[in-house]
Image: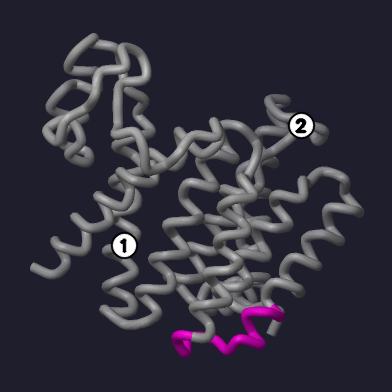
């Protein structure tokens, strides 16, 4: 029963994250006004805002003007619900579940915005860094020192890579620093490593096929997020598996 409640809670959070994704880059308030159709401006009622189910029941269209809604809405809602459920199964209802679910609620909108617009809003990065520091004081998942070191070390490493390669923006640097404030330096750098590895797996075939060029701007935020999610859910077992696979240890 609690699994279902956690999943539903995640769906609701995902619905709010869609608001953040739509409004934050446009400089709009994420609280007011109430949700409305972007085409006809009709106010959406509760029956129009049931996560995932309203989209399915309405065929992905506005009830009032029949314009099509983006598939992003149910995908973000379902993904958030699923990740919250996986977090609960991994950590139960403890402080780590609270901290990591909060981090996921920052990673998801930042990744979608970066994928769509190739920016990671400073509002998310700065708010997240502050929240990570506060959580390190309130809970015992990491120390305040580890949180600070995570900001400096993770952000510093990516800053160095950005300067050397010239292919990353400062948003990526601040984004990894934010992750470091929640996870500490080691897991944040693991997130960078796993994300880079996944990026290589995805991009190399595209470059070989001529679809992508080395000079093309690639949103790195979603890759870092994938790395962070895998590290959070799989812990250091992922790194150990990789090292054992290639016999690095």
Q: Residue 84: which disc?
A: 1
In this picture, residue 182 sits left or right of residue 35: right
User: Quadrant location of residue 100?
Assistant: bottom left
Residue at 76% from the left image edge and 50% from the top image edge: 170
Residue at 72% from the left image edge and 33% from the top image edge: 207
In this rendered view, identify the residue nearer to me: 17 or 87: 17
- Give the quadrant of the C terminus: bottom right
Q: Residue 32: which disc?
A: none
Task: Give the alpha-carbon distance from disc 2 to disc 1, as whole Å.
Answer: 33 Å
- Give the quadrant of the N terminus: bottom left
Against 148, residue 84 (above or below) is above
Nearer to us: label 2 or label 1: 1
Residue 181 part of the magenta segment: no
Residue 141 part of the magenta segment: yes
User: Quadrant location of residue 194?
Assistant: bottom right
Q: Residue 90: image x %, image y %?
A: 33, 76
Scheme of image coloration = one colour
Q: Report the magenta residues as a range.
A: 138-149
| Residue marked by disc 2 | 216
Provide the secondary structure element on which disc 1 rests: helix
* Mark 2 crowdedness (10 Å alpha carbons): few <14, some 14-19, many ≥20: few
């Amino acid at each position: 029963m609690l699994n279902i409640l956690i999943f539903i809670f995640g769906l609701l959070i995902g619905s709010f994250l869609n608001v953040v994704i739509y409004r934050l880059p446009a400089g709009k308030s994420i609280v007011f006004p109430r949700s409305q159709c972007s085409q006809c401006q009709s106010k959406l009622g509760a029956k129009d805002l049931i996560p995932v189910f309203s989209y399915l029941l309405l065929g992905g269209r506005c009830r009032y003007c029949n314009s099509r809604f983006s598939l992003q809405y149910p995908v973000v809602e379902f993904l958030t619900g699923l990740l919250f459920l996986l977090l609960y199964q991994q950590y139960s209802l403890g402080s780590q579940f609270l901290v990591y679910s909060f981090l996921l609620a920052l990673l998801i909108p930042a990744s979608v915005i970066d994928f769509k617009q190739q920016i990671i809003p400073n509002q998310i990065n700065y708010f997240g860094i502050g929240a990570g520091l506060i959580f390190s004081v309130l809970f015992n998942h990491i120390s305040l020192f580890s949180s600070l070191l995570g900001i400096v070390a993770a952000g510093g490493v990516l800053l160095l890579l950005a300067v050397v390669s010239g292919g990353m923006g400062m948003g990526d640097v601040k984004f990894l620093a934010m992750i470091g404030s929640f996870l500490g330096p080691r897991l944040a750098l693991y997130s960078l490593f796993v994300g880079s590895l996944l990026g290589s797996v995805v991009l190399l075939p595209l470059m070989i096929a001529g679809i992508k060029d080395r000079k093309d701007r690639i949103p790195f935020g979603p890759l870092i997020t994938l790395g962070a999610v895998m590290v959070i859910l799989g812990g250091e077992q992922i790194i150990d598996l990789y090292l054992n696979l290639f016999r690095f240890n």
